[in-house]
Image: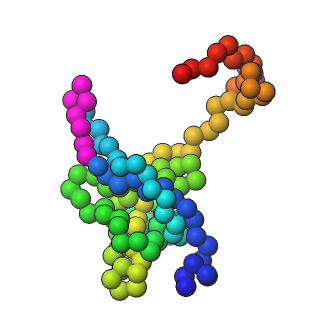
Amino acid sequence: MAFQIIAKQTVTYYQYASRVTNDIGIEITTYEPGIILQGSFQPVPRQLYAQYGLDFQKSYFTFYVSANMLDVQRNVSGDQISFNGARFQCESNVEWFNIDGWVAVLCVQIEQPAPDDFVLLDGTHFTLLDGTDFELLGQQQ
């Protein structure tokens, strides 16, 4: 019923898998392969940041989803969502699933959408955004 009134968006959901220590001792978080979810991805109004104790230097969104699968209450790392070219860390959730079939997940943006680095002209030439032209000599395998 709610999606008949509110537009839905498609996100890619990445569930936390594990942490591994790399060669220089830094823990790297790994995620399960992404799955597609549909829900409502809404910005948190800036006037609510102080009330919620949020950092004004960051961008927050709430993802409303009708799926009882989001698990962000871990001691190690939360899950992540990719939406519209940006990546978001799932911070917390409000579990309403048993009441009305919905979960509200608070997400903070951790990566900006990647800008296009180049424009492919004809399959053999490309141009950087600064105007530099290049010819492709071979394809990487």
Residue 45 picture location, percent across and down = 52, 69
Quadrant housing residue 67: bottom left
Q: Is residue 76 left or right of residue 126?
A: left
Q: Which residues are magenta?
A: 18-25
Quadrant housing residue 139: top right
Q: Nearer the viewer, residue 71 or 44?
A: 71
Work out whether 99 lies above or below 33. below
Work out whether 44 lies above or below 24. below
Work out whether 76 lies above or below 2. above
Question: Which image quarter is the C terminus in?
Answer: top right
Question: Residue at position x 29%, y 38% from top?
Answer: 28
Color theme of the render: rainbow
Question: Residue at position x 57%, y 78% from top?
Answer: 3
Taking the magenta stretch, the answer to whether it contains residue 96 is no
Residue 20 in view in this figure: yes
Question: Residue at position x 29%, y 49% from top?
Answer: 17
Residue 57 picture location, percent across and down = 46, 52
Quadrant housing residue 132: top right
Residue 14 picture location, percent across and down = 40, 53
Residue 23 picture location, percent across and down = 24, 25
Q: Is residue 68 left or right of residue 125?
A: left
Question: Which image quarter is the N terminus in?
Answer: bottom right
Q: Residue furthest right?
A: 122
